[in-house]
């Protein structure tokens, strides 16, 4: 784990600070008026130490620090797992609530005084609701299948002579996410997380080629969990509007193909670097629109070890 990554949202943000402040109020309330609940949650809590900068009373308290290890709850003991079943990204629920209240509250006030003026905040509110959506996806199966890590448009397909992590020649495929795309990120293959690398940077337009080199970004280095154990890199890159990378993964975590591991809030870029091998078929082309988890990016011909 990169020591710069101290939360699932290393760039911070206003909504994150608001949610953390609300958490302090919530913990005071639970300690004062719901001691029985706090005691039951403590009995079901797992882990040996608190890696959060505050007390941990229930699973909501580890939301921003789940990639740091420490305390956690089993799924069956977590009373808030229903939030993962909502059609919205759980990491964006605070932004969704805050922005919806502001937009639709303004809509109601303006509609009372002069209804045509209410159109703008109403449209903005609907946009934010749409932006944080997290639709269910059908994940393709099959040996050697690599699925898209993001929704958006293919803007880069580039051969790399040598990638240090992969250990040889590679192919980089870049996806531009507009403000109208779904912004959750998914794992391209069934794999184990090897490492996390974070780099602060600029917020250039994600369509510009230099954004991949200069913008804030977080790289998730993964290795397939079955032979031939190919290594890949998924890179989350901010854009001119999107300035908040979210990654809940940590080294040692295992994911199935198409599992959600994070998101980028508003327009951005996601890159996948995969090994260039004999028999590799790139199944997408420049300008093509893709969907995270359901569009097949590439396909490897199974070798003897895979068969």
Image (cartoon, helix red, strand yellow):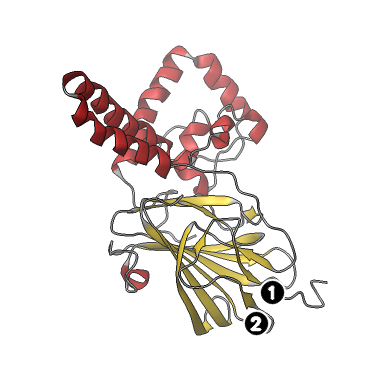
User: Which residue, given by chain and number where applicable, does mark 1 sit on?
Assistant: 300
Nearer to me, 157 or 56: 157
The residue located at (50%, 58%) in the rendering is 150
**Local crowd size for mark 1, using a 10 Å CA cut-off: few (<14), some (14–19), many (≥20):** some
Q: Earlier in the sequence, mark 2 or mark 1?
A: 2
Residue 124 in sight: yes
Q: Quadrant of residue 103?
A: top left
Q: Position of residue 275 (x, y in %)?
A: 60, 77
Can you identify the residue that label 2 sits on?
A: 277
Element carrying mark 2: loop
Residue appearing at x 74%, y 65% in the figure: 226
- Asked whether residue 20 appears in the rendered view, the answer is no
Left or right: 228 in relation to 80: right
Quadrant for the C terminus, please: bottom right
Depth check, front residue: 231 or 114: 114
Position of residue 241 measured from the top left corner of the image (x, y, whole percent): 29, 54
User: Would you identify the image quadrant in which residue 213 lies?
Assistant: bottom left
Kindly report the distance in space between the C-alpha atoms of the residues bearing marks 2 and 1. 8 Å
Residue 294 rendering spot, x and y as whole percentages: 61, 56
User: Is mark 2 in CB contact (under 8 Å) with mark 1?
Assistant: yes
Residue sitting at x 67%, y 31%: 76
Quadrant assignment, res 140: bottom right
On screen, residue 204 versus residue 186, left or right, reads left
Q: Secondary structure at mark 1?
A: loop
In the displayed structure image, the side of residue 139 where residue 71 appears, left or right? left
Q: Residue furthest top?
A: 33
């Amino acid at each position: 784990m990169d020591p710069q990554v101290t939360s699932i949202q290393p760039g911070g943000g206003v909504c994150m600070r608001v949610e953390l402040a609300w958490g302090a109020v919530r913990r005071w309330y639970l300690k004062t008026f719901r001691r029985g609940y706090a005691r039951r949650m403590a009995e079901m809590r797992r882990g040996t130490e608190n890696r959060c900068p505050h007390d941990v009373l229930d699973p909501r308290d580890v939301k921003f620090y789940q990639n740091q290890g420490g305390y956690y709850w089993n799924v069956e003991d977590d009373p808030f797992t229903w939030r993962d079943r909502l059609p919205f990204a759980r990491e964006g629920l605070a932004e969704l609530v805050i922005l919806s209240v502001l937009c639709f509250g303004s809509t109601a006030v303006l509609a009372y005084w002069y209804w045509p003026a209410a159109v703008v905040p109403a449209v903005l509110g609907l946009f934010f609701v749409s932006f944080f959506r997290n639709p269910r996806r059908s994940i393709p199966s099959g040996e050697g299948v690599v699925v898209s890590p993001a929704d958006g448009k293919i803007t880069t397909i580039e051969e790399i002579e040598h990638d240090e992590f992969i250990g040889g020649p590679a192919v980089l495929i870049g996806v531009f996410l507009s403000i109208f795309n779904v912004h959750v990120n998914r794992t391209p293959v069934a794999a184990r997380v090897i490492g996390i690398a974070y780099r602060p940077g600029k917020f250039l337009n994600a369509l510009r080629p230099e954004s991949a080199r200069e913008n804030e970004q977080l790289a998730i280095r993964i290795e397939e969990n079955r032979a031939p154990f190919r290594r890949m890199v998924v890179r989350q890159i901010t854009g001119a509007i999107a300035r908040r990378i979210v990654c809940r993964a940590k080294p040692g975590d295992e994911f199935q193909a198409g599992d959600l591991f994070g998101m980028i809030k508003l327009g951005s870029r996601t890159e996948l670097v995969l090994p260039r091998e004999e028999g590799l078929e790139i199944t997408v082309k420049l300008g093509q629109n893709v969907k995270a988890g359901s569009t097949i990016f590439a396909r490897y011909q199974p070798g003897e070890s895979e068969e």
